[in-house]
Image (cartoon, helix red, strand yellow):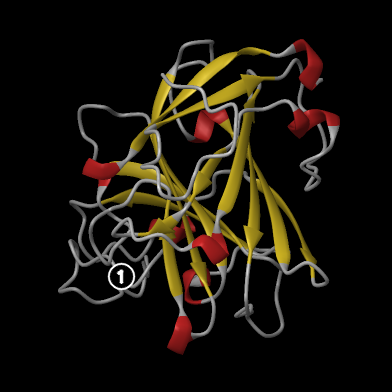
Amino acid sequence: MMVGMRSVLSLRIPVIFASLIPMASAQNITTPPSSTIVATEATQDVSLSTDPSSAFWQHTRPVFITGDTYGNPVPSHRTEIRSRWTRDSLYLLFVSPYEQLNLKPSPDTSAETNQLWNWDVAEAFIGSDFTNIRRYKEFELSPQGEWVDLDIDLDKQGDKNAWKWNSGMKVSARIDEAHKIWYGAMRIPFSAISTRPAAPGERLRINLFRCQGPTETRHYLAWQPSMSKSFHVPEHFGTLVLGGPNPAAD
């Protein structure tokens, strides 16, 4: 969740948070990112896969994190994100190159890990309210398969229970040490994101992030640059559109 919610608590990390253009080909790192993700519909829920070449992920339309929160290119950490959805779930896959991992000792994957953002994580901030954009959900997973989810309300300063919210999300992760890439997949119940039913054309507000590396060389990466040291700038979120099916993807 980034260096901290500076818009919330005195520019410091709070204890509780710590923090429609399809893209068919790889985006050049010098090109500003599209602000829209189009998720491909799937006919049914499946077991989580971290293999981007699998039938489930192969024919989706990826987007890329290419720089830091200010939009400065960070080509060594160019991160691919793929998305799919069903009537019940939203799926995200992060393909995350790294130089050096910053992993929490003694990981616990049986329960959520508060303050997971202090280590290497991939993050999705998703909101369904286009009127009150300061309300949204936060989903994180680590290269070790740890996770945390938060119910964010930027108007509730000091809400120590935000991380105790439970979305029912599932995660899977693996590290390819030989190629220095880690893969992480999320399956998020759609009911945890929106009160509206999932349907083609439905839109959500979204931004995608990574915290990567040890403290002295840590990178804070953003799909849509927040133009801040904080990730928590909903004015700079992009849009997630639930697209139609791709017959070759299932």
Mark 1 Cα shell of 10 Å, populated few (<14), some (14-19), many (≥20): many
Residue 124 position (above or below residue 47): below
x and y, in percent, of residue 69 in the image: 33, 59
Quarter of the image with the N terminus is bottom left
Residue plotted at (30% across, 29% down): 129
**Quarter occupied by residue 247:** top right
> How many callouts does the rendering have?
1
Residue plotted at (57% across, 25% down): 39
| Drawn side of residue 186 relative to residue 238, left or right | right
x and y, in percent, of residue 79 in the image: 57, 53
| Drawn side of residue 67 relative to residue 95, left or right | left
Q: Is residue 104 among the parts visible in the rendering?
A: yes
Residue plotted at (15% across, 74% down): 10
x and y, in percent, of residue 62 in the image: 60, 35
| Drawn side of residue 13 relative to residue 58, left or right | left
Q: Is residue 90 among the parts visible in the rendering?
A: no
Q: Which SS class for mark 1?
A: loop
Q: Quick one: 155 or 220, which is closer to the camera?
A: 220
Residue plotted at (82% across, 38% down): 47
Tell me the amino acid under the disc marked 1.
Gly
Residue 60 position (above or below residue 176): above
Residue extending farthest bottom: 216
Residue 11 position (above or below residue 222): below
Quarter of the image with the C terminus is top right
Residue linked to disc 1:
4
Q: Quick one: 214 or 44, which is closer to the camera?
A: 214
